Every structure is written in structure tokens, then in C-alpha cells.
Image: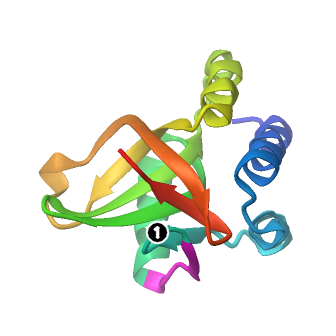
């Protein structure tokens, strides 16, 4: 993947998330400073990823050739699910991905750490809350 193009696309997506959903600017700042990826949990509260969560993100990035820039952790009856917001290497998808973000939808990789067989790519709905994001569907 072209790192310059990926970086610019992530900036565009952070612009949308900051302006539309009022996520904390710290998320972008630390991502570009040292690669820190935040997770939103418990309805939008922000946390740093643990070492185990960082390893999960890295594994997913390498396996699917994507770049993750934010994560929502949901505790569900089906297990603990990490909805990973990402950039794919397919630039043709980027414009529609940005349009979806602006409408409160995101195509994510949902890693179910309780039952990996249930992990999948798919669309989610989200809202901004408490400086982070909360998954609504």
C-alpha cells in the first residue's frame, strides 16, 4: 500500500469523525505522532489498546492487508467484538467509505475474540459519544 495515500485518506476520515461526531482530536494527534490506536468502549469512552489488543490489530492488519485507525469494543451476547475501522488497499472504495462515515455507517472488520469463527467484515452503525464512538447496530 502507498503509505502517503493511506496517510492522507486516514486524515480525511479523521476530519469526518472530528467534525461530524466530535471525537477527541487527541485520537488523530497520537495516531500520527506514534501510531497510537484508541478504542471506544462502554458507549464511547476512550481507552488505549492493551498489548494483547495491539497484537490482535497487528494480526488483522497483516492478514487482510489493511490499516486500522480506530476500534470500538462491544460486549455482546455473541462475545466481545472489536469493530476495527480501517483503510483497505482498494482506493476505489475510499470515496464511498467516506460518504458512509459521514452518514454514521462504517465497513469494519469485526473481530470476535470470544468466538473467532464469528469474525467477519461487515457494516455497522455508530454515533459519537463522550469523545469517542459508540456502535449502535
Residue at point 50%, 47% (across, down): 126
Q: Residues within 10 Å of mark 1 (few under 14, many from 20)?
A: some
Magenta span contains residue 136:
no
Q: Which residues are magenta?
A: 45-51
Q: How is the image coloured?
A: rainbow
Is residue 79 rendered to the left or right of residue 44? left
When the figure is inspected, residue 121 is found, relative to residue 26, above or below; the finding is: above
Q: Nearer the viewer, residue 82 or 105?
A: 105
To which quarter of the image does residue 20 belong?
top right
Residue 23 coordinates in the image, percent (x, y): 72, 62
When the figure is inspected, residue 54 is found, relative to residue 78, above or below; the finding is: below
Is residue 2 rendered to the left or right of residue 68? right
Q: Mark 1 falls on what kind of element?
A: loop
When the figure is inspected, residue 58 is found, relative to residue 17, above or below; the finding is: below
When the figure is inspected, residue 81 is found, relative to residue 124, above or below; the finding is: below
Residue 7 coordinates in the image, percent (x, y): 81, 46
Tell how many labels: 1
Magenta span contains residue 50:
yes
Residue at point 61%, 23% (across, down): 90
Residue 130 coordinates in the image, percent (x, y): 63, 72
Residue 36 coordinates in the image, percent (x, y): 69, 73
Q: Which residue is mark 1?
A: 43
To which quarter of the image does residue 48 belong?
bottom right
Is residue 8 rendered to the left or right of residue 90? right
Amino acid at each position: 500500500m502507498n503509505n502517503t495515500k493511506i496517510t492522507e485518506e486516514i486524515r480525511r476520515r479523521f476530519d469526518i469523525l472530528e467534525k461530524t461526531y466530535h471525537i477527541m482530536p487527541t485520537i488523530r494527534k497520537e495516531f500520527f505522532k506514534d501510531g497510537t490506536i484508541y478504542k471506544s468502549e462502554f458507549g464511547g469512552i476512550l481507552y488505549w489498546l492493551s498489548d494483547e489488543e495491539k497484537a490482535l490489530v497487528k494480526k488483522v492488519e497483516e492478514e487482510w492487508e489493511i490499516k486500522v485507525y480506530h476500534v470500538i469494543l462491544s460486549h455482546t451476547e455473541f462475545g466481545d467484538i472489536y469493530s476495527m475501522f480501517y483503510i483497505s488497499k482498494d482506493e476505489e472504495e475510499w470515496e464511498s467509505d467516506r460518504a458512509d462515515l459521514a452518514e454514521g455507517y462504517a465497513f469494519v472488520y469485526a473481530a470476535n475474540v470470544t468466538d473467532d469463527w464469528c469474525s467477519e467484515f461487515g457494516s455497522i452503525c455508530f454515533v459519537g459519544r463522550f469523545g469517542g464512538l459508540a456502535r449502535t447496530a
